[in-house]
C-alpha cells in the first residue's frame, strides 16, 4: 500500500532558451519559455523533494550572474527567479521549514535542478540527499556538463554528503526511483502512487516537453551524445505509464505546467 499522501509542483524559476535545448536538433531559432520545477511529495513516512531548483544568489547577484550566466552560454539571458520562488518560501506557505524535509531526491545534477542544495543546507535542512552513483561519477570524471561545482558544497566549501544509489529502488512505499539515463549519466525519474488519482511519473529531464514523449525525440542535452539511450528512456517511461495507467509529467513544458493545479493545491 502506498505511503504517499499528495504531490505539489513548485515553480522555482522561468527561463527562455532555444528550443533545441529541449528537443534534439529540432526547433533551432525558436525561443521557448520553460518552467524550472521542483516537486514536494508528502508521505506517511516524511516529505520528499524531487529536485531543488536554482541558486537564487547566482541569478540575482549581478557579479555572480555575469560569471555563471554569461551571454556566450545563455544567449537569451539568465533565468528569472524571485525570492518567493525559493524552496524555503514555498515550504513556508505550507507552514513548513527546510528542516521538515526528510529526503531530497536529485534527479540529476544540472544547475537548474541541484542549485538550491546550498540554500537548503544553509536554512537548516538535514535531509538525506539521494543521488545516483553514476551521476556523481560523471561530474568527478569531467564528462558531465551544465553542473556548477559549488552547488555541491556548503557555504564553507565542504562537499555535500550524498546517499549514493546504483540503479532503481523504492524510496518509500509508493515512490519508486526509475533509471532514465541519456540526458545525463545517472538521470533518474520517479514513479509516484497517489492514494486517489492515477500514478504520476515525474520524467525529470528525460522528457522536457510533451513533444519529447509524443514524438519520442531526445532532449537536446545529451550525455556524451548518446541519443539512443535518451530515446530508450522515453520509451521506458511510456511503457511504465501504460502498464500502471500512469500520468507522465514532462519537466519544462510551460503549457503542461499551466494546466496543473496551482500551488499550494495538491494532487492526492
Image (cartoon, grey):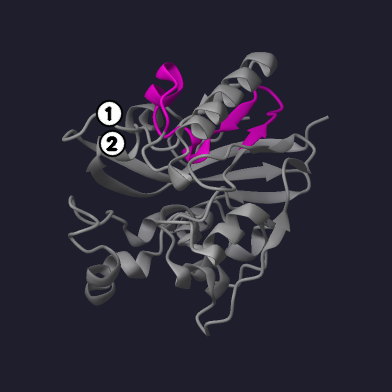
Picture layout, residue 157 above or below residue 94: below
Residue found at the far bottom of this picture: 156
> Which segment did they paint magenta?
190-218
Q: Tell me where residue 18 sits by quadrant.
A: top left
- CA gap, disc 2 and disc 1: 5 Å
Q: From where the camera sits, is residue 115 visible?
A: yes
Quadrant that contains the C terminus: top right
Q: Residues within 10 Å of mark 2 (few under 14, many from 20)?
A: some
Q: Residue 69 appears at what percent x and percent y? A: 26, 63
Q: Are marks 2 and 1 in contact (CB under 8 Å)?
A: yes
Q: Residue 211 appears at what percent x and percent y? A: 37, 23
In the image, is 227 to the left or to the right of 154? left
Q: Residue at x 75, y 34 (%)?
A: 174
Q: Tell me where residue 240 sits by quadrant.
A: top right
Q: Nearer the viewer, residue 137 or 107?
A: 137
* Element under disc 2: helix
Residue 26: mark in rendering: 1
Q: Residue at x 23, y 55 (%)?
A: 74
Compare marks 2 and 1 and give the one earlier in the sequence.
2
Q: Residue at x 36, y 38 (%)?
A: 220
In the image, is 82 to the left or to the right of 261? left
Which residue is under mark 2?
20
Q: Is residue 188 magenta?
A: no
Amino acid at each position: 500500500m502506498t505511503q504517499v499522501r499528495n504531490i505539489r509542483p513548485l515553480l522555482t524559476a522561468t527561463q527562455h532558451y532555444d528550443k533545441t535545448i529541449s528537443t534534439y536538433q529540432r526547433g533551432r531559432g525558436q525561443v521557448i519559455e520553460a518552467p524550472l520545477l521542483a516537486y514536494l511529495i508528502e508521505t506517511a513516512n516524511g516529505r520528499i523533494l524531487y529536485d531543488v531548483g536554482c541558486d537564487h544568489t547566482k541569478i540575482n547577484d549581478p557579479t555572480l550572474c555575469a560569471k555563471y550566466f554569461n551571454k556566450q552560454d545563455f544567449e537569451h539571458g539568465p533565468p528569472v527567479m524571485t525570492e518567493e520562488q525559493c524552496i524555503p518560501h514555498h515550504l513556508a506557505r505550507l507552514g513548513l521549514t527546510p528542516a521538515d524535509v526528510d529526503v531530497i531526491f536529485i534527479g540529476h545534477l544540472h544547475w537548474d535542478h541541484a542549485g538550491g542544495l546550498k540554500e537548503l543546507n544553509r536554512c537548516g535542512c538535514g535531509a538525506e540527499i539521494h543521488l545516483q552513483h553514476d551521476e556523481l561519477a560523471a561530474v568527478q570524471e569531467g564528462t558531465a556538463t551544465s553542473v556548477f561545482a559549488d552547488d555541491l558544497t556548503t557555504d564553507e566549501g565542504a562537499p555535500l554528503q550524498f546517499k549514493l544509489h546504483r540503479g532503481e529502488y523504492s524510496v518509500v512505499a509508493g515512490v519508486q526511483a526509475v533509471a532514465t539515463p541519456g540526458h545525463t549519466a545517472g538521470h533518474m525519474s520517479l514513479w509516484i502512487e497517489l492514494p486517489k488519482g492515477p500514478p504520476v511519473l515525474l520524467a525529470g529531464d528525460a522528457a522536457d516537453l510533451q513533444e519529447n514523449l509524443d514524438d519520442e525525440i531526445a532532449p537536446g542535452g545529451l550525455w556524451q551524445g548518446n541519443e539512443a539511450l535518451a530515446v530508450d528512456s522515453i520509451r521506458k517511461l511510456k511503457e511504465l505509464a501504460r502498464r500502471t495507467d500512469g500520468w507522465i509529467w514532462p519537466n519544462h513544458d510551460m503549457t503542461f505546467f499551466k494546466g496543473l493545479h496551482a500551488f499550494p493545491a495538491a494532487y492526492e
